[in-house]
Amino acid sequence: MARTRGQRRRLEWSLLAIALLGLVAWLSVSTSLSGANHLVQDVGLRLVARPAHPDIVIVAIDDRSIAAIGRWPWRRALHAELINRISAQSPRVIGMDVLFNEEDLDYPADDLLLAGALTRSGRVVLPVLRRGHGPTANAADLPWPAFTAAAAGLGHVHVAPDDDGVVRGLYLQEGPTTAPWPHFSTAMQCVADAGKRPCGAAPTATPGSQTADPAQAEGSPWQRSEPALIAYAGGPAHFTTYSYIDVLRGQVPGDAFKGKYVLVGAAASGLGDMFATPVSQQSRLMPGVEVVSHVLDGSLSGVQIRPAAPVRNLVFNLLPVAGALVALLLLGPFVALLTSAALAATTVLLSVALTGWVGLQFAPAAALVGLVLAYPLWSWRRLSAAAHFLRLEMERLQKDGLSMRLRERPGDTSDFLERRINAVERASRQLRDLHHFVSESLQQLPSPTLVCDPQGRILLTNVAARLHVGGDADVSLQGLSAVELLRDLVQTGTNLPLITQDKLRSGCMPEQAEGRDAKDRSMLVQCKPFTDLAQAGWLLTLVDITDMRRALQQRDQAMNFISHDIRAPNASILTLLEMQRAYPDRMPHEELMQRIERYAQNSLGMAENFVKLASAQTQEYRMAPLDLVAVLAETVDDVWALAREGEVEVTISTTPDTAPALGDRSLLCRALANVLNNAVKFSPTGSAVVCAITQRDRHWVVSVRDQGPGIAPELQGQLFAPFQRLHDRSHPAISGVGLGLALVHTVVQRHGGTLEVDSDVGRGAEFRLVLPLRVAALNAVEA
């Protein structure tokens, strides 16, 4: 069923992806979203503003000039004087964006003055305008023939407003099909470069020449070619500007126009053409002369903006939408929402940045529409799928006997999805309560219990199990491997792992198995397989039988001790008594008493050692602060008589002033005495036993070194086992039952320490009792 849901989900996603990508592709090639695209593109143009080109200067026919000279139009003698003054500073070119298309009948002499000024300058470009509007208008307004002949070039000053009336582009060639004119800025550059660059097929007349016959041009259809976007350098008033009246009065710097591209045009309100542009601020309009200046600036600066090719624009819009669709399929709802938002922001930023970086202008509105639609459409489909799933789950729960809890209640809302959620929530609460009851019951079990699947992954544990593996009682083990957690649990004798994945998968785990773990605990593992409709697995229960095994071992040791060791001297006593009765005169009475006493002392000593060992293993220790230096000195004094009898010297070589520790003084003295007694008994006559106390990190090391026969490394593992005598053959005269070192090992371990042996055959032995320092004493030593 899960596979069916997954297949249905992928099918729905595929259909949504096809529909949405198809919509984005259609919107990318259509003009239906031009307004939204213009909004983003205009922001990009504002963000990539650049400084004005220093060689462009505007002479503005502004309100101040009109106030000083009078209302427009002015006499052409003033324009002639303006051209003379500008030409005197040797500009590169003068663009006179003022139309002189008729003869001045009131002041005919002014036309002669203006034509003379144009001729003397030889660097003036005049504008051409299209007469009328609409596709049938094919006539042009040319300058008066005398001015056309005197001008250095002609150029059209038309722009191409978009549907919203904003000027974003123009055509670099426009006019009659037989001889179109270049744009005004292109004509200015042709004149400025003095033939260094081609000016196209435009009838840019040279001084003294005539253009093509206007009548012939008027009969030719009007055409526009070479569309281009205007790379605006900034907003209105971006270029260096001088007032017309200031130039006439000579109130400008002497080199204001030297080597410059000078444009003369109307900037007064209500006088010339004013245009809305993408870079206009607060509804400010831009005069036509400034628009021409921006076109010229882009050409001089080498900055071009061109619309991205349709294929590139299509790919640019499809990629972010495809990324959002993949995120909806693979990621969660919140992450997918963030991804969609990030892709939308990235798309907008890229479309803005690419305008300045590579001069490509993309139209991202189609991608934004796709990103906006992707998330709600997919959420709608997933919501429908969730409602369908909840309905099916309700039906299943009703079949499972939960119908009483799934009935609608008075407080339920009228929303069908909310009702289904409430019903499933009530059923889930009932199941959670049941699970909580089972889980709490499991937690109260005293034995570690684990529930795992056939692969050994833990599904449920109780507190005892978490403590058993050395973890925190509040830290869950769910999802971990039971095989890894219990890998130290091995079979007794074979040391093979008791729980393996192969056994769990194949179902070959025995119902009961006994083993030991790394802490030397005897564990009984009870295994019970279980299977239900949801899953199969194992119920593992660990029972700690260490105390029981230790008790059995102690019982066996006691039985062995009673039946063998303690029985032997008593049997010898009985044998001596029977011999005395049978042969009264064979053994002197004094010798008989000595032998009986020796056997009785041996029996009493063995019984006392056994009792002490049992007491050290089971009794509660009376822990109190003590000084190991004093304990060692006291023990050496106690062994003095035995050492003198064996002619062995016992010395203390190295000790600190004090060695504070925490322990049971009587048991530590007994353990240290056992080590010293062994060292003295096995030392040859005339040898020495050396004792010392040193500090090792956070422990005291009490060492006893003898010069006895030594212990082979392969036998050292048996030293601390009860009833082990390793020198019965080499030193049969030395009595003992092998309980002394077992007591030492038990006492040291219960004090939190360790017992170390350094020995080999023929070079003596060194026993080291490693005991922890007291915490307060450790701080004093470190200080």
Image (cartoon, helix red, strand yellow):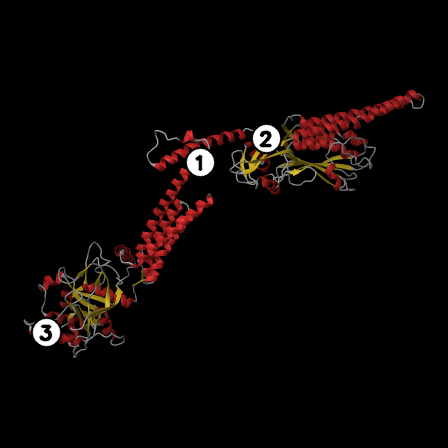
Sequence-earlier tag: 1 or 3: 3
Give the side of residue 31 with respect to residue 387, left or right: left
Sequence-earlier tag: 2 or 3: 3
Q: Secondary structure at mark 2?
A: loop
Give the side of residue 61 with respect to residue 295, left or right: left
Residue labelled with disc 2: 447
* Res 656 seen here: no
**Picture quarter with the C terminus:** top right
Residue labelled with disc 3: 111
Residue 396 got which mark? Answer: 1
Mark 2 or 3, closer to the camera? 2
Give the side of residue 78 with respect to residue 703, left or right: left
59 over 680 or under it: above or below: below
Residue at 14% over, 66% down? 132
The x and y percentages for residue 297 are: 26, 66
Residue type at numbered disc 2: Ser
As rendered, which of 500 and 5 lies closer to the eye? 5
324 over 240 or under it: above or below: above
Residue type at numbered disc 3: Asp
Q: How far apart in space, not on screen, are marks 2 and 3 (Cα)?
A: 118 Å
As rendered, which of 604 and 640 lies closer to the eye? 604
